């Protein structure tokens, strides 16, 4: 604790009172004190505390302290201007500690020449300590410069403190758009003014980039994949020479040769595969898979086979039997009109708030599914299928492992779905970019069926959610949880042009 800081000790839990022993002490003597079992939390406040109430307001009050302490991934926020909504907080890190809070009193009568009477007592055990070791972020004040050089506060004009009439919103207010934060880091970092490797003199790659483009410190490793659009006239019949050399150079173990043989058999049995399906059927390291796939197949960017790997020499646009290999971009519909909300869905999002380390949060990985949520029969179904098969196969009575899935039609093992896919068997005439060899609106019908099955699974566990109590939604109300940008509560319309854009970008970056 520094000189200009104050230690604040709070009592979240009281498990008992230990016996206290007061003992008069002389200089250099010792005393025995009884240990109490009272648990305390210490906050090393970065400042002198004159008013306890003002100090508590700066950390959000006792309720905010309790909420922060209950979540080990949260950092304690301290605002030196608690009434200013634009005040950036100083964040305190949470540490485990084994300290004692000791009260020492020294009493001495005025005018007495005798030794002082010293008493001590242990108030509690400190198991958690919050320390403010970072630097304060820049502060942006809501001020406006007048022509005469004076500054005028904008708080009364931009902050709605009470219900106002229409005239309040028609007032002419200067533009005030403060950033949500200035820095994601509050600790000093040794930079040493290192030059950017992408912009060093003589670097050929830097000459190809825009002058204003900041490149990564490490260039991507090329995996030499071939990307094909739906409207291209020809398809590749063999891999790039660099892809051959790259795989031959890295396939040095017996397991790599075995994986190549297994994958060749997969593409002989079925000419089109998704990467998830390949990973579920071939035992190979993910980094080696990035090298092997471009060696055996090309990647479709658009059309009904987008985001899939196609065997070299096979053109699904000219083969009606390739209809069963088309992709279905399915996303779980979350909304009260479907009988369950976002929080009721046991399938968690791939990306959540815990995956991003903001200044107020410590990284903490979350589980994708909630334990004990699924019914027993559904849990057994998931266990029987195994985690690998469920990554690309859908059957009735099971839940997808993610909220967005890229299924191939042949992997939808439901009789009702198969009947819809086979409605025009033998009558395929034109391969459309949206529906492929299927009839129009086939993908929409399949999504409705899968969504209905998932709704039945969720309602089987939570029947009360089938008749939800809707709350009025006020304008500007902030959602308590936001899982994915793609999952809007009241927008289920599918846009094929935006299909699996996020999934494809993630996979394409591995091969560029």
Image (spheres, helix red, strand yellow):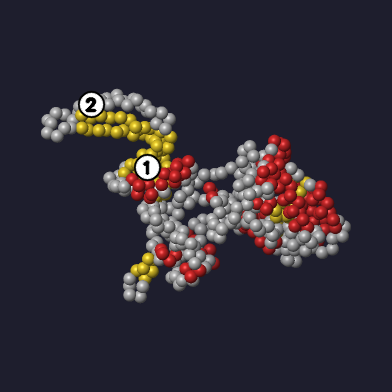
On the rendered image, what quadrant is the N terminus found in? Answer: top left
Answer with left or right where residue 110 lies relative to residue 287. Answer: left
Q: Estimate how packed mark 2 is, as few (under 14), some (14 to 19) or many (20 or more) residues with alpha carbons within 10 Å.
A: some
Residue at position x 73%, y 54% in the image: 447
Which residue was labeled with disc 2? 24
Answer with left or right where residue 245 lies relative to residue 113. Answer: right
Which residue was labeled with disc 1? 43
Look at the numbered disc 2 and give the secondary structure of its residue: loop
Q: Position of residue 96 (x, y in %)?
A: 42, 37
Q: Is residue 215 visible?
A: yes
Answer with left or right where residue 113 lies relative to residue 411. Answer: left
Q: Nearer the viewer, mark 2 or mark 1?
A: 2
Q: Position of residue 65 (x, y in %)?
A: 43, 44
Q: Position of residue 115 (x, y in %)?
A: 16, 29
Q: Estimate how packed mark 1 is, as few (under 14), some (14 to 19) or many (20 or more) residues with alpha carbons within 10 Å.
A: some
Residue at position x 35%, y 49% in the image: 54
Residue 257 lies in what quarter of the image? top right
């Amino acid at each position: 604790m520094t000189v200009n800081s104050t230690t604040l000790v709070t009592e979240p839990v009281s498990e008992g009172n230990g016996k206290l022993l007061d003992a008069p002490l002389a200089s250099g003597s010792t005393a025995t004190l009884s240990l109490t079992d009272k648990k305390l939390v210490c906050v090393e406040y970065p400042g002198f505390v004159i008013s306890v109430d003002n100090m508590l307001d700066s950390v959000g009050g006792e309720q905010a302290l309790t909420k922060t302490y209950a979540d080990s991934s949260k950092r304690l926020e301290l605002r030196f201007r608690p009434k200013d909504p634009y005040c950036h907080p100083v964040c305190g890190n949470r540490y485990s500690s084994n300290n004692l809070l000791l009260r020492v009193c020294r009493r001495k009568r005025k005018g007495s020449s005798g030794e002082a009477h010293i008493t001590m007592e242990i108030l509690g055990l400190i198991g958690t300590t919050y320390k403010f070791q970072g630097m304060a972020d820049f502060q942006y004040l809501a001020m406006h410069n007048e022509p005469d050089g004076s500054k005028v506060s904008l708080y009364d004009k931009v902050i709605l403190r009470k219900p106002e009439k229409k005239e309040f919103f028609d007032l002419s207010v200067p533009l005030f758009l403060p950033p949500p934060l200035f820095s994601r880091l509050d600790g000093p970092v040794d930079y040493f003014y290192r030059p950017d490797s992408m912009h060093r003199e003589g670097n050929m790659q830097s000459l190809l980039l825009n002058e204003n483009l900041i490149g990564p410190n490490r260039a991507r490793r090329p995996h030499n994949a071939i990307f094909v659009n739906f409207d291209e006239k020809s398809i590749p019949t063999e891999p790039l020479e660099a892809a051959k050399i790259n795989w031959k150079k890295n396939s040095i173990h017996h397991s790599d040769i075995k994986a190549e043989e297994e994958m060749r058999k997969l593409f002989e049995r079925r000419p089109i595969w998704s990467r998830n399906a390949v990973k579920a059927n071939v035992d190979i390291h993910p980094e080696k898979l990035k090298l092997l796939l471009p060696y055996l197949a090309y990647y479709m960017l658009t059309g009904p086979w987008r985001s899939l790997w196609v065997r070299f020499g096979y053109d699904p646009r000219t083969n009606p039997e390739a209809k069963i290999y088309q992709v279905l971009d399915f996303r779980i519909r979350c909304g009260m009109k479907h009988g369950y909300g976002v929080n009721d869905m046991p399938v968690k999002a791939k990306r959540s708030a815990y995956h991003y380390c903001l200044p107020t949060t410590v990284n903490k990985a979350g589980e994708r599914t909630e334990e004990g949520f699924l019914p027993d029969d559904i849990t057994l179904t998931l266990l029987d299928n195994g985690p690998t098969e469920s990554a690309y196969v859908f059957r009735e009575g099971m839940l997808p492992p993610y909220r967005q899935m890229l299924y191939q039609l042949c992997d939808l093992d439901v009789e009702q779905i198969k009947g819809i896919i086979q409605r025009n068997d033998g009558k395929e005439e034109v391969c459309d970019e949206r529906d492929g060899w299927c009839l129009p609106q086939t993908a929409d019908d399949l999504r409705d069926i899968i969504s209905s099955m998932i709704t039945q699974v969720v309602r089987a566990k939570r029947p009360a959610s089938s008749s939800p109590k809707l709350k009025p939604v006020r304008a500007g109300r902030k959602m308590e949880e936001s899982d994915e940008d793609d999952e809007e509560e009241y927008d289920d319309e599918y846009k094929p042009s935006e299909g699996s854009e996020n999934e494809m970008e993630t996979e394409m970056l591995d091969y560029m």
